Image (tube, grey):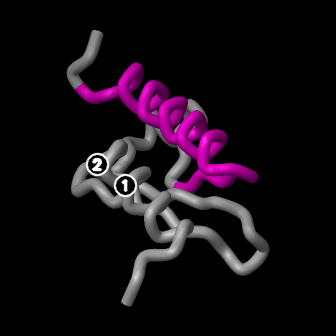
């Protein structure tokens, strides 16, 4: 089965951000979710880190994922 533009973009996003899965919904919004084995801590969740992000475009989705990676990284256990 040939790759569609969406599946190609999804594959690229998932390769760029290991630990994240991506998809495009029927409403044509782009979504990503954390798939890594390390769950967010309660401190990370309270600080606003999210399990899911959404966007209108693949570029905006990548920006949202980067922001979530930075948020979780700032509050990672053992980091001072």
- Badge 2 crowding class, 10 Å Cα cut-off, few under 14, some 14 to 19, many 20 or more, is few
| Position of residue 32 in the picture relative to residue 21 (left or right) | right
**Residue at x 75% of width, y 52% of height:** 56
Q: Are marks 1 and 2 in contact (CB under 8 Å)?
A: yes
| Tag shown at residue 78 | none
The N terminus appears in which quarter of the rendering? bottom left
- Secondary structure of the residue carrying numbered label 2: loop
Height in image: 42 above or below 4? above
Q: Give the residue number, with chain letter if any, for mark 1.
A: 14
| Position of residue 60 in the picture relative to residue 33 (left or right) | right
Task: Count numbered badges in the picture.
Answer: 2
Q: Give the residue number, with chain letter if any, for mark 2.
A: 18
- Secondary structure of the residue carrying numbered label 1: helix
Image x and y of residue 51, in percent: 50, 53
**Residue at x 31% of width, y 50% of height:** 15
**Residue at x 44% of width, y 25% of height:** 70
Highlighted magenta segment, given as a residue range:
52-77
* Magenta highlight on residue 72: yes
């Amino acid at each position: 089965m040939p790759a569609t533009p969406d599946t190609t973009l999804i594959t690229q996003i998932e390769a760029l951000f290991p630990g994240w899965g991506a998809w495009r919904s029927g409403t044509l919004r782009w979504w990503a979710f954390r798939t890594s084995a390390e769950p967010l801590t309660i401190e990370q969740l309270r600080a606003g880190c999210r399990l899911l992000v959404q966007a209108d475009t693949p570029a905006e989705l990548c920006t949202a994922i980067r922001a979530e990676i930075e948020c979780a990284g700032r509050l990672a256990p053992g980091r001072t």
